[in-house]
Image (tube, rainbow, N blue to C red):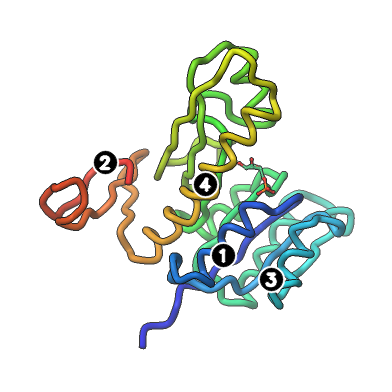
Amino acid sequence: MKEKLKLGVLVSGRGSNLQAIIDGTLQGKIDAVVKVVISDTATAYALERARRHGLDTAFVDPKQYPSRQAFDMAVVQTLKKYDVDLVCLAGFMRLLTPAFVNEYRNRILNIHPALLPSFPGLHAQRKALNHGVKFSGCTVHFVDEGTDTGPIIIQAVVPVFDDDTEDTLSERILRYEHQIYPKAIQLFAEGRLEVRGRKVFCQRSEKENGEKEGWGLMNP
Ligand code: GRF
């Protein structure tokens, strides 16, 4: 039997996306196994979620390292120890250094709560609201050296309402995050994603969209 894709998930906080990933693997929606959950924050609730599922966790303390790159290399070392194939950033609040990105080129995914390239970085929902957009959403993308700039895999769109607050919009977006992140991981696990320049092509099967088999820029 083919060995399952090995995931390493990086978290800093609440971990609801981690939970969606764990659930996806347990429910057979993601053909992969979470090998390790790594955090830069000892008290992250995400670590507690991981432990409840009996998953291995690691806290890598940024204060113990003289530079961002040294910290990143400690994280990479842990990922290597677990022989991780795909790194999933799930609310990980640190930018990766080029040294990290190079180690896992096109094998790092991130979820961002806006329709990139709009509103990269922190407080994306607040920025979208303040800007007065009528629609926002979320994006799963490969990670490159920039801040939320990597090739886009899947996006989901949600409406923005007049009476939205940062909280109500975030909550609406989050529901879709929990759908598209597991989906993107599964597409990766099936070997159906291909990065060509800044675009991600997805191999479709005949039954999808009534299209013929082949590679396309579809939003799966
Ligand atoms: C999510 O909104 C995600 O898009 C962003 O950080 C938040 C993490 O939430 N990158 P959680 O920790 O997964 O609940």
Residue at (79, 56) in percent of width and height: 45
Quick one: quadrant of the N terminus? bottom left
Which label sits in the foreground, 1 or 2? 1
Q: Does the residue at mark 4 contact the one at mark 1 (Cβ under 8 Å)?
A: no
Residue at (48, 44) in percent of width and height: 140
Q: Which amino acid does label 3 sit on?
A: Thr
Q: Residues within 10 Å of mark 1 (few under 14, many from 20)?
A: some
Residue 2: x and y in percent read 37, 83
Residue identified by numbered label 3:
78
- Mark 3 or mark 2: whose residue is earlier in sequence: 3
Residue identified by numbered label 1:
23
Q: Nearer the viewer, residue 67 or 125?
A: 125
Q: Nearer the viewer, residue 43 or 146?
A: 43
- Mark 4 or mark 1: whose residue is earlier in sequence: 1
- Mark 1 or mark 3: whose residue is earlier in sequence: 1
Q: Quadrant of ligand 1?
A: top right
Disc 4/disc 2 C-alpha distance (Å): 18 Å
The correct choice, above or below, for 155 with respect to 19 in the image is above
Query: Does 24 sit left or right of 36 as displayed?
Result: left
Q: Is mark 2 on a helix, strand or loop?
A: loop
Disc 3/disc 2 C-alpha distance (Å): 34 Å
Q: What element carries label 4?
A: loop
Q: Nearer the viewer, residue 4 or 78?
A: 4
Disc 4/disc 1 C-alpha distance (Å): 23 Å
* Residue 217 image label: 2
Q: Nearer the viewer, residue 38 or 208?
A: 208
- Mark 3 or mark 4: whose residue is earlier in sequence: 3
Q: Which amino acid does label 4 sit on?
A: Val
Q: How crowded is mark 3: few (under 14 residues within 10 Å), some or many (20 or more)?
A: some
Residue identified by numbered label 4:
143
Query: Does 55 sit left or right of 115 as displayed?
Result: right
